[in-house]
Image (spheres, helix red, strand yellow):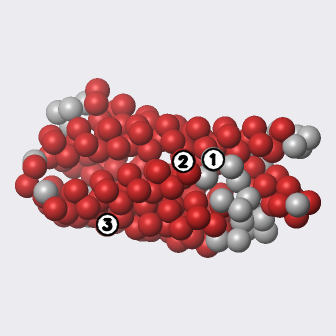
Amino acid sequence: MAGSMVATAGVGRNWWALVLRGILAVIFGILIIVSPGIALTSLILVLGAYFLVDGIFAVAGALAHRDHYHPWWLTLVEGIIGIIAGIAAFVYPGLTALTLLYVLAVWAILTGIFEVVAAVQLRKVVQGEWLLAVSGVLSVLFGVLLIVFPGTGILALLTVLAAYAIIFGVLLIVLGFRMRGMTTGMGGTHAPTPA
């Protein structure tokens, strides 16, 4: 029991990384909604920036609590995939809409799989891990829908992408704050937010 409490505190110390990733996703979704006429090249660059920043936070979070979170490598791989997808978007900004759709679909499916597996592992340590599982399932479904219905057009893609980003972001924010509450509820101290 004591080991479980220490592990929970260790994972909970980095709650802010999940919250930041969630905030970034929500901002990304809102940007798409307020700029529906965004050009494809601009969309690719914004999406690339999101992938890159989200990937960096995922890698940082994985490395920060690798001592307390046994499947930390899943989050690390998820982050690396995001960084690679982000770099690809910047290196090849002239991607076609269909190529963008498939890059987004693969990223969503892989991210979702890693999140579901991480949620299964976290159930022994953290309450509320189902939020991560739900966000993972949503990611996989989103990716599969993009592959199954590739001809829906870029505007439909933007609407679905915005909704997905906002829902995904809100789930990560809620999970992050639940992890923070569990850490402080056990008598721990609030982790300092990064400077």
Reply above or below: 193 against 107.
Answer: above
What amino acid is labelled 3 in the image? Val
| Residue located 27% across and 51% down the image | 44
- Which disc number belongs to residue 131? 2
Measure how far apart labels 3 and 1 are at the Cα level: 26 Å
Quarter-of-image position of residue 156 = top left
Q: CA distance from mark 1 to mark 2?
A: 6 Å
Which numbered marker is on residue 128? 1
Pointer 1 with pointer 2, Cβ within 8 A? yes
Give residue 75's position: percent from left, percent from top. 57, 65
Position of the C terminus, as image quadrant, is: top right
Instruction: Name the foreground residue: 159 vs 91.
Output: 159
Give the CA distance from mark 2 to mark 3.
21 Å
- Residue 51, image x and y in percent? 42, 55
Q: Position of residue 60 (x, y in %)?
A: 64, 59
Q: Determine crowd level at label 2: few under 14, some 14-19, many 20+ residues with C-alpha closer than 10 A.
A: many
* Element at label 3: helix
Measured as percent of width and height from the top left, residue 4 is found at: 83, 61
Of circles 3 and 1, the one toward us is: 1
Using the image as rendered, state which of residue 122 and residue 99 is in the foreground.
Answer: 122
Circle count: 3
| Residue found at x 66% / y 59% | 123
Element under label 1? loop
Quadrant location, the N terminus: bottom right
Q: Dot 1 surroundings within 10 Å: few (below 14), some, or many (20 or more)?
A: some
Q: Nearer the viewer, residue 191 or 141?
A: 141
Residue that appears at 29% across and 26% down? 34
- Residue holding disc 3: 106
Precedes in sequence: disc 2 or disc 3: 3
